Amino acid sequence: MGASQSVRRPDFTKLPELPLPLYVRSTGRFQLDPHWSGPGGDNSPFVQIFWGISGSGTIRINAQKMTLSTNDVAIMFPGESHHYFAGNEAWDLRWFTFDGPGAAAFMRSYSYPRLIQGAGPCPHRLFEELESALLEMSPFRQRRLVSLATEIIALAGGSDDDNSKHARLVRRFIELAQANYSNSSVNVNTLSGILGVHRSTLARIFKEHMLINPGDYLVRLRVQHALALLRESDKSIAEIADLSGIADPSYFCRTVRQATGMSPRNYRDSSP
């Protein structure tokens, strides 16, 4: 098989008494020999996260086979069974499990795919801290386990350290939008021209990374600026609209109402 190590919480078949949204149950690391295969468990009562460190292999979860390579993440839900099939080279991966009444719903709320390709390097420090916290299991350490688990899950979705071509394009658009939103002549077409990319390509890439359209992001910047000026300045509403990059007064009023449920004047009057 190769080398394996794992740490489980004491009396891992029972949930701790401390009320928490989830309970980390175990964590470990597999360093599997080439071509090794073996069962991982049947009808497991927990969510399990796998993070590829090096090499490549296949995890079969129920009937679904997923190739887990370096920097990939795979997810298994309660009630499922899994089996490991190492590839042509040694396969190194870390994993952790968590349970609790809302564990599956908590994981599904992220809307991640079962296999996240290119999530990034495995966060070894966080996994190592999981191990030490599981050994201690004081009330603070139990709460800390929740924050470590959610940090690992957050990193699985990609981090701000992503230096891919697409990530750089998104960051550059954000920089340009933040620098130019007060200019009403600036729109997504303007910024895509500066970036040298077609508007539809920019929209697709931006939505993949930010879960919002670039046009909506630009409007959000303008509205946030406008609301701050309405709360904190004595400038006229027409002047605030112009300073926020929304030259059309009717559109400005409509946009503020969509964001707050109030007209600009009523929003200003309601602010402390």
Image (cartoon, rainbow, N blue to C red):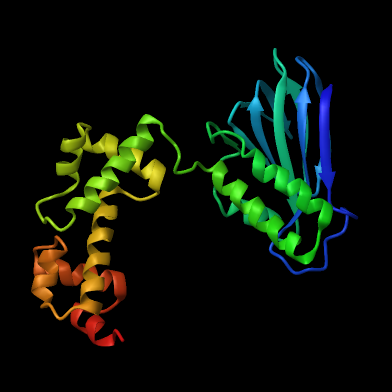
Residue 61: quarter of image: top right
In the rendered structure, the answer to whether residue 119 lies left or right of residue 107 reads left
In the rendered structure, the answer to whether residue 76 lies left or right of residue 239 reads right
Q: Which quarter of the rendered picture does the C terminus lie within?
A: bottom left
In the rendered structure, the answer to whether residue 42 lies left or right of residue 270 reads right
From what the image shows, is residue 267 above or below residue 247? below
Q: Residue at x 54, y 32 (%)?
A: 117
- Which sits in the foreground, 81 or 170? 170
Q: Is residue 25 visible?
A: no
Q: Residue at x 75, y 59 (%)?
A: 100
Q: Residue at x 69, y 59 (%)?
A: 144
Residue ranking furthest to the top: 88
From what the image shows, is residue 119 above or below residue 145? above
- x, y percentage for residue 41? 83, 37
From what the image shows, is residue 205 above or below residue 223? above
Residue 38: quarter of image: top right
Q: Residue at x 61, y 35 (%)?
A: 122
Q: Which quarter of the rendered picture does the N terminus lie within?
A: top right
In the rendered structure, the answer to whether residue 165 lies left or right of residue 184 reads right
- Which sits in the foreground, 125 or 201? 125
- x, y percentage for residue 170? 33, 41
